[in-house]
Image (cartoon, helix red, strand yellow):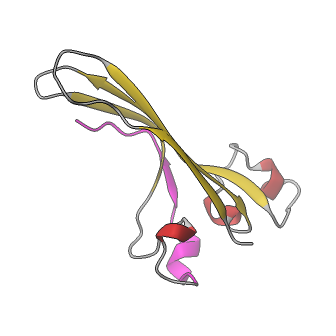
């Protein structure tokens, strides 16, 4: 099994300009592909210390904070997937059955980002 993916989220309520709101998003998976997305020091002991074939990785997790400033300010803090091209890290979003060499050497996750 390459990936068993689970999504959990609460989208922000950005309608109106007079309230604060928060939201979250979590995408996690279990399978062989955790080798490509594991971040050192963050759920990485299963791979780096024990070299297990199967593992867990919370690939995408973030919190949105919506502030009623002008047209709305959304601050997003967390861990994100990078976008190397047509290849996606999660199986439901990937068009290809296999990955290119670029997929194995490119950084696949990044931390913290602000969006206004």
Q: Residue furthest right?
A: 50
**Image point 12% across, 28% down: which residue?**
71
Residue 74 in the image: above or below residue 51: above
Q: Foreground: 12 or 67? A: 12
Q: In the image, residue 47 lies at what x, y percent? A: 79, 58
**Image point 47% across, 68% down: which residue?**
93
Dividing the picture into quadrants, the one containing residue 74 is top left
Residue 111 in the image: above or below residue 35: above
Placement of the C terminus among the 4 image quadrants: top left
Q: Is residue 62 visible?
A: no
Q: In the image, residue 98 lies at what x, y percent? A: 58, 84
Q: Is residue 50 visible?
A: yes
Does residue 10 appear to the left or right of 12 in the view shown? right
Question: In the image, is residue 62 part of the stretch drawn in magenta?
Answer: no
Q: Residue furthest left?
A: 70
- The residues colored magenta run 98-116
Placement of the N terminus among the 4 image quadrants: bottom right
**Image point 44% across, 59% down: which residue?**
82
Question: In the image, is residue 110 part of the stretch drawn in magenta?
Answer: yes
Q: In the image, residue 17 lies at what x, y percent? A: 16, 21
Q: Foreground: 110 or 71? A: 71
Q: In the image, residue 69 lies at what x, y percent? A: 16, 20
Dividing the picture into quadrants, the one containing residue 30 is bottom right
Q: Foreground: 13 or 82? A: 13
Does residue 45 appear to the left or right of 112 in the view shown? right
């Amino acid at each position: 099994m390459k990936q068993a993916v689970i999504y959990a989220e609460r989208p922000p309520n950005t309608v109106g300009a007079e309230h604060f709101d928060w939201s979250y998003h979590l995408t996690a998976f279990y399978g062989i592909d955790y080798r490509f997305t594991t971040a050192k020091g963050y759920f990485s002991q299963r791979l780096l210390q024990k070299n297990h074939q199967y593992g867990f990785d919370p690939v995408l997790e973030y919190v949105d904070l919506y502030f009623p400033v002008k047209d709305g300010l959304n601050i997003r803090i967390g861990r994100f997937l990078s976008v190397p091209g047509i290849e996606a890290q999660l199986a439901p979003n990937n068009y290809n059955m296999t990955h290119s060499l670029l997929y194995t050497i490119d950084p696949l996750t990044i931390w913290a980002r602000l969006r206004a």
